Image (cartoon, coloured by chain):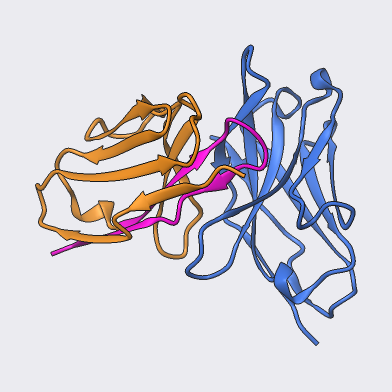
């Protein structure tokens, strides 16, 4: 059974940092991209970014709203994905979801098929 | 960025009814559309990928169709456990974006 469990959420002041972890199980972690999405109550989900597998260089992509502030990384030996969030703003408040990205052969695209239960991040003074 | 417009924003139907949700892209996106179900307090769940392919383990009453700019999601016989918000999502290019959602309730 595929499992992703986010941890590390909480209350943080504007301008500070927070790091989310996403330990996984039930699949070969190194074969997949890992993505992060976020959502505020009553709103549609918003893509944050993703990291490709090492087979595709482990390259990262980010939404414009978080680029240069957030960093996604991965530890293939432990099966864990991370989201480092720096210079946090009030508008970064939301539930953050870790997701598994299956590569669509020949298209350079990914389908994010499994999602964790989410971690709440609140940015407030 | 390409926008996705979903309609209706909400609907109420009886158990056993057939319901349809539409998702229109502001530009052609081939078949690079997924459909997710999100129940209250839960994470989104992938139901349909590539516009019409049923994700493994998802009941066959769910289906999707379309390509280019117009996409349709159908529940052939609405069940009480289908109460949720449904989102279309495009993955043709970055940034990945979602439609505004359709809240489905039981009449």
Residue that extends furthest to the top in the rendered view of this protein: A106
Image vertical order of residue A36 relative to residue A86, above or below: above
Residue B72 magenta: no
Q: Position of residue A27 (x, y in %)?
A: 64, 28
* Residue in the image at 14% along x and 42% along y: B77
Q: Nearer the viewer, residue A103 or A98?
A: A103
- Residue lying at the far bottom of the rendered structure: A125
Tell which of B79 and B31 is nearer to you. Answer: B31
Q: Quadrant of residue A108?
A: top right
Measured as percent of width and height from the top left, residue A94 is found at 64, 68
User: Over which residues does the magenta segment extend?
Assistant: B84-107
Q: Quadrant of the C terminus of chain A?
A: bottom right
Please tell me which residue is depicted at 28% across the width and 46% down the height of the picture. B21
Quadrant of the image occupied by residue A4: top right
Of residue A88 and residue A80, the one placed in the foreground of this image is A88
- Point out residue B28 in the picture as x, y percentages from the top left corner: 48, 30
Residue at 33 percent of width and 60 percent of height: B9
Q: Give the letter of the orange chain.
A: B
Given the current orientation, which residue lies at the most extreme front position? B27
Residue A103: quadrant of the picture: top right
In magenta stretch: residue B106:
yes
Q: Which chain is blue?
A: A
Left or right side of A103 for B102: left
Tally of numbered tags: 0
Q: How far across and down, in percent of the image, does residue A44 sit? A: 51, 58
Left or right? Give the position of B50 relative to A112: left
């Amino acid at each position: 059974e595929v499992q992703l469990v986010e941890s590390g959420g909480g209350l943080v002041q504007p301008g500070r940092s927070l790091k989310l972890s996403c330990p996984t199980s039930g699949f070969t972690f190194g074969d997949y991209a890992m993505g992060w999405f976020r959502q505020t109550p009553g709103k549609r989900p918003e893509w944050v970014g993703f990291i490709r597998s090492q087979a595709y260089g482990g390259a990262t992509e980010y939404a414009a709203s978080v680029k240069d502030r957030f960093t996604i990384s991965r530890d293939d030996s432990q099966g864990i994905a991370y989201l480092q969030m720096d210079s946090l703003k009030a508008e970064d408040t939301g539930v953050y979801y870790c997701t598994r990205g299956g590569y669509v052969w020949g298209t350079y695209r990914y389908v994010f098929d499994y999602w964790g239960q989410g971690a709440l991040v609140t940015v407030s003074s | 960025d390409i926008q996705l417009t979903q309609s209706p924003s909400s609907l109420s139907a009886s158990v056993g009814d057939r319901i349809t949700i539409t998702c229109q892209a502001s530009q052609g996106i081939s078949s690079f559309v997924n459909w997710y179900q999100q129940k209250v307090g839960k994470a989104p769940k992938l139901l349909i990928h590539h516009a019409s392919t049923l994700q493994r383990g998802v009941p066959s009453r769910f289906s999707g169709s379309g390509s280019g700019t117009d996409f349709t999601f159908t529940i052939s016989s609405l069940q009480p456990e289908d109460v949720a918000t449904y989102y279309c999502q495009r993955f043709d290019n970055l940034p990945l974006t979602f439609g505004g959602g359709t809240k489905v309730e039981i009449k």
